[in-house]
Image (cartoon, grey):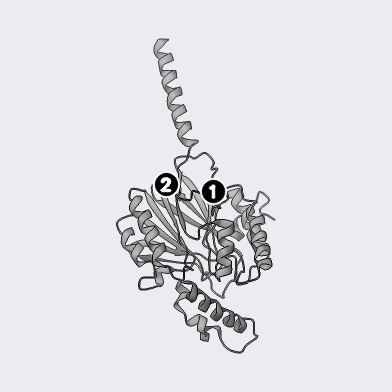
Amino acid sequence: MKKALQFFLISLLLWSCQTEKKSQPEFVHDISEGPTPWTSSAFELEEDYFTFAIIADLAGGERPGVYSTAVRQLNRLDPTFVLSVGDLIEGGSHDSTILNQEWDSFEARTAQLNMPFFHLGGNHDLTNLVMRDFWADRFGPRYYYFKYENVLFLMLDSEDFEDDRMMEIDAARAEAMKVIRGEVEGEFEDTAYAQMIESEAGGMRQEQIDYFKEVLIANSDVRWTFVLMHKPLWKREGNKGLGQLEELLATRPYTVINGHLHTMSHRIRNERDYIMLGTTGGYQPKDSMAFDHVTLVRMDSVPVITHLKMEGILDETGKVPD
């Protein structure tokens, strides 16, 4: 009887320790004051692994209802949290009234998620200096990191240009948009904006690169690193692209994920997975790999990445959640 009681007490203690561990998932960041780029830091209890989701681009001509449907589908899939790769609003405006309306619309739909959502800016979200200020007021830093269950997430700002250069890019983009809207004759590919390397591959200032260098050095023992960005910074040569960080990442397992081109693709670079997402409501080019989807990542000993086309995520009636 005494041994049975001892066994019961030991089992109860072990169960209590496991429960306590599961009720306190690790969430580390370095933002100590002001607004934060995530909606909540309250996470559900975990199993031995966790699953997170990623949404792709909404902008460039958002199609009504798609993102709202994705939110309902994500609630059914029930990941621990949801990440983004930018282009969350149409943006491009200097008018505070328009920007407020667009962000209010996005935030109202995102608020329907049952789990935390992590913001990341794209060129539509951070087109000009005015929009940078909007981001700072609503979400805090444009680039940041967090660590969850010893998995490191680097959230990069691919629109990190010097102020003067950002104004030049903004002006060139405005002229290119006239071509797209048919207000001026010509082809988008021939515009000054389309010829800028920043248009396709973005850029980072050394200050941001140095920030993430310190993060990587301070977190050298994590079990995996995810690097998220909007534009494919790995396409940019020189000291404004991903190269300096790739050198530090070379000795650890990592995955790079970006958006921007609205067409899904996968490649092996540096013997690692580099994944470009499609859309979750954004404009779709005529391409067989341009489709609406959400991405699920199950973080076991290695990440298991699954892309789910929205048209195949059905409710109990066999229909896309309406």
The disc label shown at residue 300, or none: 2
The disc label shown at residue 79, or none: 1
* Image x and y of residue 253, in percent: 35, 55
Q: Would residue 309 be visible to someone looking at this image?
A: no
Give me the C-alpha separation between circle 1 and circle 2.
14 Å
Q: Amino acid at mark 1?
A: Pro
Q: Amino acid at mark 2?
A: Asp
| Identity of the residue drawn at 34% across and 65% down | 244
Q: Is residue 165 left or right of residue 95?
A: left
| Identity of the residue drawn at 68% across and 68% down | 98
Q: Residues within 10 Å of mark 2 (few under 14, many from 20)?
A: few
Q: Is residue 70 left or right of residue 83?
A: right
The disc label shown at residue 253, or none: none
| Identity of the residue drawn at 48% across and 76% down | 165
Residue 255, located in which quarter of the rendered image?
Answer: bottom left
Residue 89, located in which quarter of the rendered image?
Answer: bottom right
Q: Considering the numbered disc 2 on the image, is that residue within a helix, a strand or a loop? A: loop
